[in-house]
Image (cartoon, helix red, strand yellow):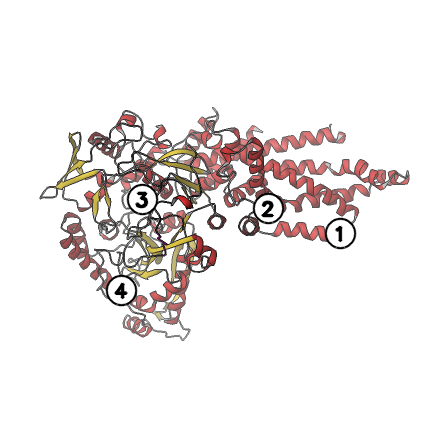
Amino acid sequence: MLLILLTGCKEKSVSYIQSDTKETGYEPAYGDTLITGSIGEPSVLIPMLAGDSASHDIAGLIFNGLVKYDTDLSIIGDLAESWEISKDGLIITFHLKKGVKWSDGVEFTASDVLFGFNTIIDEKTPTAYKEDFLQVSKAEVLDKYTFRVTYKKPFAPALSSWGNLVVLPEHLLKGKDITKTTMTREPVGLGPYKLKKWVPGQELILESYKDYFEGRPYIDGYIYRIIPDPATMFLELQAGGLDMMGLTPLQYTKQTDTEIFKKNFQKFRYPVFSYTHMAFNLRHPWFKDKRIRQAIAYAIDKKEIIDVVLFGLGSPATGPYVPNTWPYNPDVKNYEYNPEKAKQLLREAGWKDTNGDGILDKDGKPFEFTILTNMGNNLRKNTATIIQWRLAKIGIKVNIRVLEWSTFVNEFIDKRRFEAVILGWSISPDPDQYDIWHSSKTREKEFNFIGYNNPEVDELLEKGRRTFNTGERKKIYFRIQEILAEELPYIFLYVPDATPIVHSRFKGIKPSPIGISYNLPKWYVPKPLQKHAMEP
Amino acid sequence: MIPTLFGITLISFMILHLAPGKPTDVLADFNPKITPEARERLEKMYNLDKPVIVQYVLWLNKIVKFDFGESFSSDRRPVIDKIWDKKQPLTERRLFITFMLNVITMFVILVIAIPLGITSATHQNTLYDRITTTSVFIGFATPSFWLALLLMMFFGVYLGWLPISGLKSMNYDSLSLAGKIIDRINHLILPVFVYAFGGLAGDSRYMRSSMLEVIRQDYIKVARAKGLPERIVIYRHALRNALLPLITLIGLSVPGLIGGSVIMESIFGIPGMGQLLFMSVMTRDYPVIMGIVIIVGFLTLLGNLLADIGYMLADPRIRH
């Protein structure tokens, strides 16, 4: 769960996938370079030390994990050929692929995994991804190609945690302070690309790793340009300085709807693994009452928000999962737009407009509250504005305050000084959301900041992370969604779509629930269309 | 100069720490995988658990030995390497890029603003004076990011004449020396133009008013009475004195120019110190911000000192 709230660009989901790839009878060929842009510069290329998405973009091309997500979100082997999980779910034994080589020619073995594991749990390693690995009681190398971990308690998200965070070249890092090695800026990995040159503030140039264990990537070069301004980036795309970038809803629907774009580019669209919601502070006397929360839900038209704010590029959210993924429950209570019902619920709760000023009141107090959201995300600000307008129609006065991110988190969320907030969570493909909903996670800096407390949900969350059978887990998370839909601690608003655009000379792109870049090594540019030659 | 610099760092350090947020937020905020204990460990590692004044003394102890410390971002690079990376060629180092961009812009501003100021003074209240005044104020009032985007769209996308962002083309390394120079110049045209356009107003107006003041003086009347041609009167006798206030103005404009670099470098994707400052502020990377503050503070004070010295050399009246 990286960069939660900065909803954005990493992993994706099913439901509908649109693309306008123009596949023709071309033959795959080696060569050419893909140029992409980023508003941020990577800081460190060792995955476990990286906290920003730019670093993970690049580190993800250089390092591989033991396992990865397949296009249908099941877990498949990456560096692991196969694995066994013991009956009680406590022991996982990985059998690694043989003959895989680091880009400096040394063979990859089980001790590299153990070394990575020992590094990530080390006190001195500044990493944000330690917690999953602290659940491990014992990690051991059985032989050169076999690695075994034992857990203290059954832990369902365990398998998926053995991605690219923990595989490090022991022969280069042993006995060194990981934060001080040259590896952070000149990494040696075993992924499809290797770093050729890093010009600070300008670009990172990667070249394909010819001995990549899944076969040499077709595209020889990958250039990651740093362009801090999003408007400049879009102009670079038009001028031919970029081959790929993520579009905003406005750019996707309107600004790229021209002949030039249709001829030269291919656009893609699929749901992002995230959702935007309005969360209530459940300690607040008004929002303690379920009827009030439901009334507000009835007064908001999600479809309208998606059409206006996202130009239709999203789908309504009904719970904390992405539609059409396996944990998603499609049959929960749905709050269709119904202002009459909303007014009725508010009347039942004792809210009436006694003084005729158009705002409901109770015990002499008008129904007025403030929605907080963070600066720099216009989608959220616009969503707040629509909600403000809709709630005014049923007699609730809403104020909107947009705050700088750090102020927002430190002064308002952490100190619980809010009534309602509009935020987003990006979610991992594993359905475990213990940290967000469990009643034990309400301390400062923890993520149940709304103060949600439901004993049944607590119990289900605990059971969910101890259960390995997908069918049974599904039942657990379906029930959690039913409860959340009834109680509405959050009003789940929408799941936005990712809308990347790629130059049309790139072929072999197969959009899937996890996005488009998962098979980058298989993308190619047919010989006659190649544009850039990689300098040797 | 040293006490001033000390004051600058103290105030900057305090203001920086007054702003909400910490460098660890990037890793830890709203990341369910990080526990409060892990967060405390991280904060301890950066000494963020100590009182601000202790943190300042720790920082000061290093800086007096010219040790800028290490960045708090996850790359942990020494601050000095970020600002002045000795592994890169001189022309790729951030401080150099920002310095050169500012020197070039300053030069362009002066080359345009001085003649503009002089001619509007000599043609005071004519149509020409009004047009130039209006145009420099339009330049002053135009939001630079907006103008930059329009020009990028026109020259970069529509005409395709100029590159849009960055400092060099993709094929830069394969170019001949002349090609490299032309490539660099091409990349600098738009940023320097936009940057200079906004800065013309100040200098040209100063030049105008100082010229107006000078040509009312008695010695100019004398020169005219002697029958000297107007060209000689203005450019030989009046100009020398009229230029004096401009020396001070140039010296004082250092912080303003560097502040402008932050915006220009971010829009045009120029890898200079301004861009680094912008990114560091966003991530609350205190050591890098402080490193840049020290450099900018030093350059500002140096600018003031040079202005004083320059004024002294140019104007014998204040030598005592």
C-alpha span from label 1 to label 2: 23 Å
Q: Please name the residue that numbered disc 4 is placed on.
A: A289
Q: Amino acid at mark 4?
A: Asp
Residue B149 versus residue B140: which sits nearer the camera?
A: B149
- Residue underneath mark 3: A522
Tell me the residue that label 1 is attached to.
B128
Please check the rendered image and state whether residue A21 is part of the magenta-colored stretch, yes or no.
yes
Q: Nearer the viewer, mark 3 or mark 2?
A: 3
Per the image, label 2 sits on a secondary structure element best described as: helix
Label at residue B194: 2
Magenta-highlighted stretch: main secondary structure?
A: loop
What residue is drawn where x is 81% and y is 40%?
B234
Q: Quadrant of residue A292?
A: bottom left
User: What stretch of residues is rendered in magenta?
Assistant: A19-24
**Residue A180 visible, this angle:** no
Q: Tag 4, which chain?
A: A
Of the two numbered discs 2 and 4 in the rendering, the one whose residue sits closer to the viewer:
2
Rendering coords of residue A158 (x, y %): 19, 43
Q: Residue at x 28, y 71 (%)?
A: A345
- Amino acid tagged 1: Tyr
Label 4 Cα crowd, 10 Å radius (few <14 / some 14-19 / many 20+) = few
Residue B296 part of the magenta-drawn span: no
Q: Position of residue B44 (x, y in %)?
A: 33, 34
Disc 2 is attached to a residue of which chain?
Answer: B
